[in-house]
Amino acid sequence: MNKNRIFSAAFIAILVGVASLSVRASTVENLYGEAAAPTDSSRTINVTSSMKWVEVKHGETVKFVVAGKDFAWKFDVPDTQGKFSMNKIAPLGVLDRNVDIYMDGRPRD
């Protein structure tokens, strides 16, 4: 009986450890860069209501201004390229619609 409890506890500990690693591996910051202070930005993009997409480059820190609210993001993940939604990196409540971010390239039809 004691061996079963020890085995169960060890098994649960391993499962919890593996689960926490997989959650961390897929966080937004790992995929697209990391949040930054707006004062650290090298460029500001004013996101207007008519904008459907913006373009950024790897290594760039951008301050986004949306209807008087702002946030900054450092795009420092070199193996990410393509398109993703700004909603994935914007603080909750900043965007009320989808704006795509294109990394190192313009939208392709």
Image (cartoon, rainbow, N blue to C red):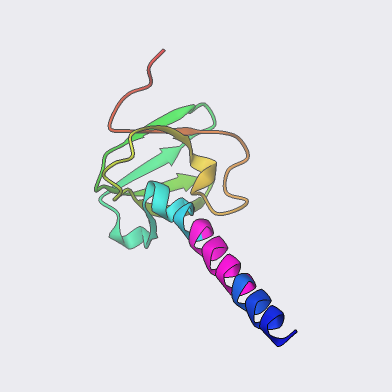
Count every numbered label the image shows and give the total. 0
- Quadrant in the picture for the C terminus: top left
13 with respect to 35 (left or right): right
Q: Quadrant of residue 41?
A: bottom left
Q: Which residues are magenta?
A: 12-23
Magenta span has 47?
no
70 with respect to 75 (left or right): right
Q: Nearer the viewer, residue 42 or 21?
A: 21
25 with respect to 77 (left or right): right
Figure check: 101 above or below 64: above
Magenta segment main secondary structure: helix
Q: Quadrant of residue 16?
A: bottom right
Query: x, y percentage for residue 48?
Result: 49, 34
Magenta span has 21?
yes
Q: Nearer the viewer, residue 102 or 8?
A: 8
Query: x, y percentage for residue 17?
Result: 53, 69
Q: Residue at x 51, y 33 (%)?
A: 99
Q: Residue at x 27, y 39 (%)?
A: 57
Q: Residue at x 38, y 17 (%)?
A: 108
Q: Nearer the viewer, residue 53 or 103?
A: 103
Q: Nearer the viewer, residue 41 or 106?
A: 106
Query: x, y percentage for residue 95?
Result: 58, 43
